[in-house]
Image (cartoon, rainbow, N blue to C red):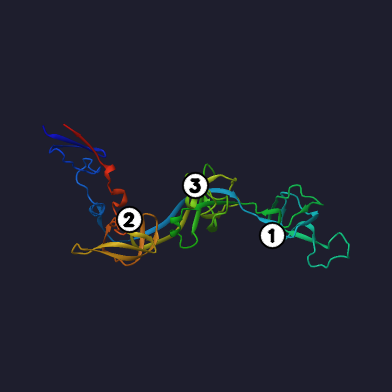
Amino acid sequence: MSKKKWIIAGTGLVLLAGLGGGTYVMLPRVLGGGGPEVPMEQAALETSAPFTVELGSISSVMVLDATVRAAPGEDVTARNGGTVTRVWVSDGAPVENGAPIVTLSAPDAGAAGGEEGAEAPATREVTLYAPRVGDVTGLGDLRDGDVVEPGAVLATVAPDEFQAVATIPSNDLYRFGGEPRDIELSIDQGPAPTACEFVSLGPAEQGGGGNAPEDGGGVEGGGGGGTELVCRVPADVEAFEGVTGKLSVSVEDVSNVLAVPVTAVRGNADEGEVMVVAEDGSQEMREVALGVSDGSMVEVTEGLSVGERIMDPVPLDPRFDVPGGADEEFSEEDYLIMEGE
């Protein structure tokens, strides 16, 4: 009776009959019954189709999760420390820019020392002023006679306004060529959407900002890094610290431009590559210059003409999209051979 070799390879079970004794066949675990393998690059080419380049319009609008927070204030700092001799205002008081906040008796570093044996060093009166218009906070129970250390923050003056803050995913920063044109704020379960005046686009403040992702990593992470878009909530819009909403950010609008699918371009910022299909069916990879993108279509500013055809999606790049590699190398552990009569 001939021996039968049962070969269990991954999810497939293969029976090889009529093999002579002592003959072993090693088959990889990829034999799952799905037919012959098709290389990834070949599969990508088979699913691509020519796209004819035409003129179109692109409106680059981003919708971002946002959080409303009180506008940050500026600190009133006792640079040299000293002893409080007068507190001019109370917590919560509105002040104008340059209004007196606290007066200190501070060491006079520029004065000559007193007579030999004198215990008290020379001092001078120093008044700390409001650095901006706003409301005073942080004074607490500060009173005359209190001693403060050098560099101590005695109060903060903050404007009576709110800001909407959104965290920008790192790769979406490529879509910002400059300041956003228009920003609309919609507060969840709040007032109707309203214009939100652009304030800044830059590094996130430690501990503040928009909504962080669930994994807490990347530019949106809770570690205080990343990039934030900040806009000013109008004074007549009712808002509260910590409420959430969305920002609709209009980055740029263009019309009568060459617009192609982003899937047909390798690279979506400044420069890219497309696979151009000639009249005779031959193909060539061509470099192009890119402009505005809405995430679906991208403007081509140089390198293509109306009526030319490009492959969509663009074929895989053998420099990066290499099928296989270490994950597809097989060892004896990838095979299980069962022998029986």
Classify 10 Å Cα crowding around label 3: few (below 14), some (14-19), many (20 and above).
few
Q: Is residue 328 visible?
A: yes
Classify 10 Å Cα crowding around label 2: few (below 14), some (14-19), many (20 and above).
some
- Callout 1: helix, strand or loop? loop
User: 317 or 258: which is nearer to us?
Assistant: 317
User: Which residue appears at 88% of the width and 65% of the height?
Assistant: 116
Q: Which residue is mark 2?
A: 263
User: 281 or 132: which is nearer to us?
Assistant: 281
- Coordinates of residue 96 in the picture (x, y in percent): 71, 58
User: Is 69 left, or right, of 94 in this rendering?
Assistant: left
In the displayed orientation, state which residue is furthest to the front: 22
Classify 10 Å Cα crowding around label 1: few (below 14), some (14-19), many (20 and above).
many
- Coordinates of residue 218 in the picture (x, y in percent): 47, 51
Q: Quadrant of residue 126?
A: bottom right
Q: Which of the image's four quarters has the C terminus?
A: top left
Q: Quadrant of residue 25?
A: top left
Q: Which residue is mark 1?
A: 131
How far is the residue under mark 2 from the one under mark 3? 29 Å
The numbered mark, 1 or 2, whose residue comes first in the sequence reads: 1
Q: Amino acid at mark 3?
A: Gly
Q: Quadrant of residue 61?
A: bottom left
User: Which residue appears at 50% of the width and 47% of the height?
Assistant: 212
Q: Nearer the viewer, mark 3 or mark 1?
A: 3
The numbered mark, 3 or 1, whose residue comes first in the sequence reads: 1
The tally of labels here is 3
